[in-house]
Amino acid sequence: MYLLIHSESIYITNHVKGTARNTMATRLLVRRIWSVCVKDSRRLPAASLSRSSSSSSSLSSFLRTAVHKQYFLCPRSLPLSSHRCVSFNVQDNDDFTERVINSDLPVLVDFHAQWCGPCKILGPRLEKAIAKQKGRVAMAKVDIDEHTDLAIEYGVSAVPTVIAMRGGDIIDKFVGIKDEQQLDSFVNKLIGQ
């Protein structure tokens, strides 16, 4: 993907197999990033932006400063925190062993698939239930299409399937969608409350 900024206009071109096409989603994303960067440019020291020059040189000056200070990479609207991420995608069997089986924290393992409608409903609910625990529980997401061997090993025959594990042992399991109250009690059971 190429981002061309010329005279305060944004052009996005995706090159897919030699053909160029514009995508609405990409344009919207860049516009949001652009608006954050423009807002941040107002907060930059006066020396970094030349207000007396023309609009295009002011823009190019800002872009050099913004790229140099990584305004595009770390927009101010995204909180930067040092807390440990308690939700992660499993990469392979070794990653599963290291981050789930050998975890010091209890772990909810969410077996899901991209094509699964109920999985898309349950995923955010699980994230919310995990977030309420403030780091006392981790959540591993396993895509069954990418990690079929793990799905078979843990007896997953339908998605979504959620398995609660502590110290490498299965504590509890459910298949299908649960409401927020049921998920909260499921998580509390895992951490022993």
Image (cartoon, rainbow, N blue to C red):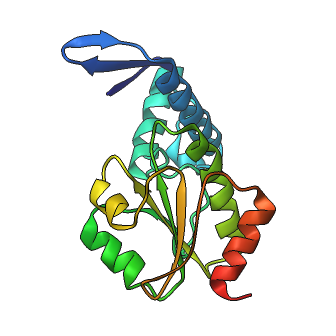
Above or below: residue 65 compared with residue 128: above
The answer to whether residue 37 is visible is: yes
Q: Residue furthest right?
A: 181
Q: Residue at x 47, y 44 (%)?
A: 72
Residue 63 in which image quadrant: top left
Q: Residue at x 71, y 79 (%)?
A: 188
Above or below: residue 18 compared with residue 108: above
The answer to whether residue 86 is visible is: no
Q: Nearer the viewer, residue 86 or 7?
A: 86
Q: Residue furthest left?
A: 18
- 111 horizontally vs 120: left or right: left
- 20 horizontally vs 123: left or right: left
Q: Residue at x 69, y 81 (%)?
A: 189
Residue 137 in which image quadrant: bottom right
Residue 120: where, in percent of width, then height? 58, 43
Quarter of the image that includes the N terminus: top left
Q: Residue at x 50, y 49 (%)?
A: 159
Quarter of the image that includes the C terminus: bottom right
Q: Nearer the viewer, residue 95 or 15?
A: 95
Residue 39: where, in percent of width, then height? 65, 40
Residue 8: where, in percent of width, then height? 51, 20
Residue 95: where, in percent of width, then height? 30, 71
Q: Nearer the viewer, residue 179 or 26?
A: 179
